[in-house]
Image (spheres, rainbow, N blue to C red):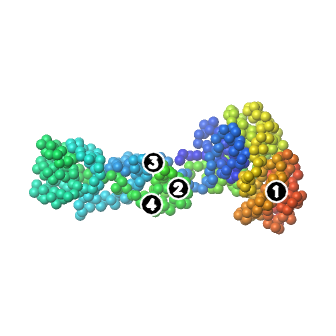
Amino acid sequence: MKKTVYIIGHRNPDTDSAVAAASYARLKQLLGYENYVAARAGHFTPQTEYIFNKFKVPVPEYIPDLIPKTAYFMQDHCETVSAETSLWAAIGKMNTLNYKVLPVVDSDGTYKSLLHYNAFAKDVLTILNPEKKIGITTSVDLVCSTLNAQPIIKKNSEQLFKCMIMIGSAKIETVRANLEEHKSENLIVIASNREDVHEACINAKVKLLVITSGYVLNKELRTVAEKNNVSVLISPYDTSSTSMLVSYSTPVSVMADASVQPVMPGDTVAKVRPKLQTSASRCLPVVDSNNKVCGLINESDLLHEPNVEVILVDHNEMSQAVEGVENYRLLEVIDHHRVGNLATKYPITFINKPVGATSTLIASLFRENKISIPLEIASILLCAILTDTLILQSTTTTDIDREMAEYLSNITNLDIQSLGEEIISAGSRIGGRDASEVIRQDMKEYSEGKLVYTVSQIEVDNTNEILKRKKEFLQELEFERRSRKGLFSALLVTDIASLSSILLIEAEKDFLPFIAYPKREENVYYLKDIVSRKKQLIPMISEVVSQYAR
């Protein structure tokens, strides 16, 4: 594949993360970088899906992980050869292209086998073994094209047949005896300008008579050959060269290695590497889901830089990034959260500002680059700012967010308050949704030293439904905590009407006494005026975890 730069948010993308990726990719494309692609590492929340559908914006490409795969290293341009092509033509194509291998495909392009020099050498030595009679599979058309011969008579010329090759250079008595000995077989006889040999072959009804050195067939014998269904070709080469070339007229499918199984673009490098190491040519064809050849991968390709680079938006901690991201060059980070433990091998562009939404920063980049914001992009940017700042009421909201929201509102002619209420309402519906889905739709993992914990968040217009299903949500939080061997897992439920939250938490029993928030119910705490996970809850939780770890 061509070099691709994925712009991607965190593993469980909320609206700001998804919008930032889609909008920044559009900005890069408008700046002339066509290989920048918006991506997402998880499924959309109902709110995010609603926004992208409302403004008809293509959703970012779904990439569940960035574990190194064949597609990121393979050569995506690959010539193939038809299974019906002669071996001679296939070898010529390999030489012209400077290929070490050549995938063999059938008439509809489906992969069949791989022609490589190891298999070719083995089979040719078998065919050209002087201690054995030469036997090949071919057709009149293949012999004709391999020799660049002049056809005189062609009978059933496309039909493949197994045959013996005989050189008609001995005394006529010996030729006749040999013809009699092999009269039950398909024979290709190669002869020069000896009419007696021509006549004997035609009378014996051989499959194909090849006359060498440009000599022609007697017209009277031509009539007999037509009657006896004998094909006749005139080779421009001498007898020695002609006999050698006829041996190479066998279809490439006969000589290719059918035991070489292809790999797919989505196969991991860990899976493909052992197959390459045991492949005779250290090379494998790559096929798509329809078994059509889409590339090649060599063992040496795995030594090169992958064809993927990454830009992170709305996060900068590897624990929140798509799995496998550490295998690729990181070009940029654009975020508004705390700075985690990110380390890079190369200098990067790092934009991190304490604003209410990453989408505020993306909108600013459009203006800084003097690029007009497309109407649909301006619309989703406004939505993202409003969702991440609770319609500009969150404590994380800055003057920059307010100014940018007004700017985008003017561009799109969308009312801030009514649009904000509409999209937050779309994301607050939890009726009929599993607790696991709600918890994972916007879940982030954090670490303090060796301690790991997760905090999920959802905004609702009333916390009653969550409290009615408290047992279900706590069970799912405990499952999440145990699966990660974490200190705790929590769900921050923000009431957009009161601009306060409740916190559901499942934790190690000796951790719960450290939580000093007002207790509403067992494992449920009331957080007055707390609406921001990153700016309000996480700093407080981090301090509690530090006290516990002492």
How much space separates mark 3 and mark 1, taking CA atoms?
60 Å
How much space separates mark 1 and mark 2, taking CA atoms?
54 Å
Q: Which mark is residue 279?
A: 4
Q: The residue tagged with tag 1: helix, strand or loop?
A: helix
Disc 2: which residue: 302
Disc 1: which residue: 468
Q: Seen in the image, is 461 located left or right of residue 37?
A: right
How much space separates mark 2 and mark 4, taking CA atoms?
15 Å
**Mark 4 or mark 1: whose residue is earlier in sequence:** 4
**Mark 2 or mark 3: whose residue is earlier in sequence:** 3
How much space separates mark 4 and mark 3, taking CA atoms?
18 Å
**Quadrant the C terminus occupies:** bottom right
Q: Seen in the image, is 94 located left or right of residue 346?
A: left
Nearest-to-viewer mark from 2 and 4: 4
Kindly identify the residue that appears in the image at 24 percent across and 63 percent down: 132
Nearest-to-viewer mark from 3 and 1: 1
Nearest-to-viewer mark from 1 and 2: 1
Question: How many residues crowd around disc 4 within 10 Å: few (fewer than 14), some, or many (20 or more)?
Answer: some
**Residue 238 visible in this rendered orientation of the protein:** no
Amino acid beneath label 4: Ser
Kindly identify the residue that appears in the image at 47 percent across and 52 percent down: 291
**Residue 465 visible in this rendered orientation of the protein:** yes
Amino acid beneath label 3: Cys
- Number of numbered discs overlaid on the protein picture: 4
Can you give x and y, in whole percent of width and height, for residue 487 in the image? Answer: 77, 64
Q: Residue furthest right?
A: 518
Disc 3: which residue: 78
Nearest-to-viewer mark from 4 and 1: 1
